[in-house]
Image: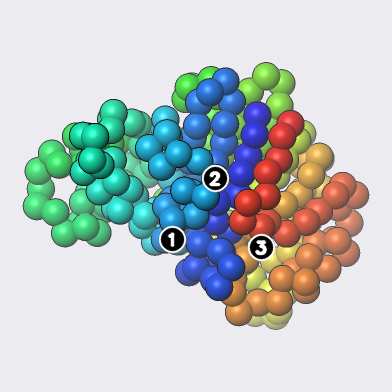
């Protein structure tokens, strides 16, 4: 399994990164985890624009889904004719949300390009992957995802506050892409985002192999977030997500 960071900025694109998007590949199958604003531009640096076989959207905040609207254009109006229809997994109202975001009339245009399928807690088969989802602590319907293939496991937190379900989902994962959107300050809103320290604590409880901190807000100091995670008690390697970083496992 190979994971490439396409975008890792939180809440909005930063100067060095689009918003959340990760490319997961195995056995010739390519799947995007999230497709936040700016992701399609970055994707073209690392993979064929139309060579995506499936998309999973963790939740419907713009920094995790909005570039699906422009990806619809790319797949529908490319010079050689429409690209094959691909599945898009997400919260129950993903299709309506995306159609409204592009201001399309209620018609089959976007659903002719994307086969929208609902995410539900539990395991499912997507291409060569076993994908297990769990609801996270966030103001909207939001999922963490565990992707397994060939004895290896990746867990992606999506957006979440403190979550015992995330610990269970990530248990024993080789790679843990965990959000760390908040700086460690008093009186933070609950059920919204994790700090670097909290990401490290979740990683230690889950016994993961490697922690990669993501959803990094542009106004926070990433070195502080990294220091918080390293001081959390997590005993494995920890690093900041960067566009173009590749993980093979």
Q: Residue at x 43, y 35 (%)?
A: 52
Please state which of residues 1 and 83 is positioned toward the viewer in this rendering.
Answer: 83
Q: Which mark is residue 46?
A: 2
Foreground mark, 1 or 3, reads: 1
Going from the N terminus, do you reach mark 1 or mark 3 first? 1
Separation of disc 2 and disc 1 at Cα? 14 Å
Going from the N terminus, do you reach mark 2 or mark 3 first? 2
x and y percent of residue 137 in the render? 54, 55
Q: Residues within 10 Å of mark 1 (few under 14, many from 20)?
A: many
Q: Residue at x 68, y 50 (%)?
A: 245
Please state which of residues 152 and 85 is positioned toward the viewer in this rendering.
Answer: 85
Secondary structure found at label 2: helix
Please state which of residues 88 and 2 is positioned toward the viewer in this rendering.
Answer: 2
Q: Residues within 10 Å of mark 3 (few under 14, many from 20)?
A: many
State the residue position of label 3.
Answer: 180
Secondary structure found at label 1: loop
Please state which of residues 171 and 7 is positioned toward the viewer in this rendering.
Answer: 7
Q: Could you tell me if residue 104 is visible in this image? A: yes
Query: Circles 2 and 3: CB distance less than 8 Å?
Result: no
Instruction: Tell me: residue 135, above or below residue 52.
Output: below
Foreground mark, 2 or 1, reads: 2
x and y percent of residue 140 in the render? 42, 57
Instruction: Tell me: residue 232, above or below residue 205.
Output: below
Q: Which mark is residue 38?
A: 1
Q: Tell whether 46 sits left or right of 220.
A: left
x and y percent of residue 184 in the render? 72, 74
x and y percent of residue 102 in the render? 21, 57
Separation of disc 1 and disc 3 at Cα? 20 Å
């Amino acid at each position: 399994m190979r994971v490439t960071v396409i975008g890792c900025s939180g809440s909005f694109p930063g100067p060095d990164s689009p918003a959340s998007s990760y490319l997961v590949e195995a056995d010739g199958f390519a799947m995007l985890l999230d497709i936040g604003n700016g992701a399609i531009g970055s994707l073209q640096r690392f993979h064929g624009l139309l060579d995506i076989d499936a998309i999973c959207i963790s939740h419907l905040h713009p920094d995790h889904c909005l570039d699906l609207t422009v990806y619809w254009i790319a797949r529908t109006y490319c010079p050689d004719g429409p690209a094959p229809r691909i599945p898009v997994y997400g919260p129950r109202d993903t299709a309506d949300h995306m159609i409204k975001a592009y201001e399309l009339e209620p018609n089959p245009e976007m659903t002719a390009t994307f086969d929208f399928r609902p995410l539900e807690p539990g395991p499912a088969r997507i291409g060569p992957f076993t994908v297990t989802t769990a609801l996270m602590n966030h103001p909207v319907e939001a999922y963490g995802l565990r992707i397994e293939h060939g004895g290896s496991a990746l867990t992606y937190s999506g957006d979440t506050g403190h979550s015992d379900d995330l610990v269970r989902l990530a248990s024993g994962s080789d790679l843990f892409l965990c959000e760390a959107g908040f700086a460690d300050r008093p009186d933070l809103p609950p059920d919204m985002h994790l700090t670097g320290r909290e990401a490290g604590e979740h990683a230690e409880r889950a016994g993961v192999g490697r922690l990669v901190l993501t959803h990094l807000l542009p106004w926070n100091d990433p070195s502080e977030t990294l220091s918080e995670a390293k001081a959390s008690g997590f005993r494995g390697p920890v690093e900041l997500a960067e566009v173009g970083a590749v993980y093979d496992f």
